[in-house]
Amino acid sequence: KIVLGIESSCDETAVALVASDRTIIAQRTASQEEEHAPYGGVVPEIAARAHAERLAPMLEAVMDDAGMKLADVDAIAATAGPGLIGGVMVGLVSGKALAMAADKPLLAINHLEGHALSPRLADETLEFPYLLLLVSGGHCQILSVKGVGKYRRLATTIDDALGEAFDKTAKILGLGYPGGPAVERLAREGNPDAVPLPRPLKGSKEPHFSFAGLKSAVMRAAQSGEHRHADIAACFQQAAVDCLIDRLEHALAETGRLPALVVAGGVAANQVIRAALEELAATHSMRFVAPPLALCTDNAAMIAWAGCERLPLGESDPLDLKARPRWPLDPEAESVRGAGV
Ligand code: ATP
Ligand code: MG
Ligand code: FE
């Protein structure tokens, strides 16, 4: 089976064709970094307009790259949330139109499910269940992934997502947007012990994350003028790593050992974080699986792949389905101080 995937929930417009045997037949991703850079973050109206302008030509280009027609596709998978509602609607409406025109099933994909299943696209040996650290621009969660559609959230952030903390740190250090890769680069030249920074919720009996206090501490360290920016970046990254490892240890104490530790989402592109997670996995005799960098940040291959996973389960969605700006992967998880679904 071949699934056409469409992603437009944030600032990446992306289209991909993926086959059930895990072949990425064709894919294109257009980032809107240049449009949003002057504002230091994603501006929803600009994002929606850019998606609307780019999606149709990109769909055509991907079909051309693959040498395929819509008739050759078995289903259309489009992100239906969570994300910036204007952008999500652009992609979802296009997906519905294609599904209707070609008389193919529509699969409305939860963007987080795309991230959560992306490691299985990259690694065919990765079986359920696995412990997933989902770290992205809008989310920081630990989930136990028991199967397609079977996600139990064990922890979430009570304030900022980790990607958000990277982006804010980059802004404070004058590194511009997007911040994650820039902070990682600068951190390579810094001493990770030079600046004392907090590890919020480390050792807490609660399972959750918190990064707001870390961000404020970064702000104070920068304003003091006493530290090299590279040292601040390195210490911020180290504090983030320590928090991730501590919270994963907490989760593992709850679930017991699972066969694999898996990381996904944009922040999973970070090499220092990947190395620390790999070490943690080894300590617990767990396999460690991280998707290649291009599958970590937003892309449409993961959306098409989520479609490939759902299609054999006989699933499809109605064409009047609504876009959902908020859409938790685990509907049973309690909201935590109103934040971090
Ligand atoms: P969500 O998936 O929660 O809806 P999103 O789609 O905007 O949010 P992603 O594209 O998955 O997020 O991830 C983008 C985030 O990843 C940004 O915050 C970015 O700074 C961060 N990021 C990307 N590369 C790196 C890196 N090398 N190190 C740290 N963070 C990174
Ligand atoms: Mg992005
Ligand atoms: Fe994402």
Image (cartoon, rainbow, N blue to C red):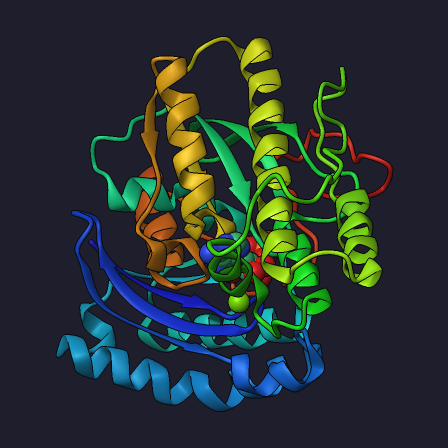
153 vs 210, nearest the viewer: 210
1 vs 245, nearest the viewer: 245
Residue 107, x across and y down, in percent: 43, 56
288 vs 48, nearest the viewer: 288
192 vs 287, nearest the viewer: 192
Residue 216, x across and y down, in percent: 82, 51
Q: Quadrant of residue 235?
A: top right
Query: Residue at point 52% right, 80% down?
Result: 32
Extreme-front residue of the structure: 226
Query: Residue at point 39% right, 70% down?
Result: 99
Q: Is residue 206 visible?
A: yes
Residue 301, x across and y down, in percent: 33, 60
Query: Residue at point 58% right, 87% down?
Result: 35
Q: Is residue 81 visible?
A: no
> How many marks do you count on the picture?
0
Residue 60, x across and y down, in percent: 29, 85
Split into 4 quadrants, where in the image is the C terminus? top right
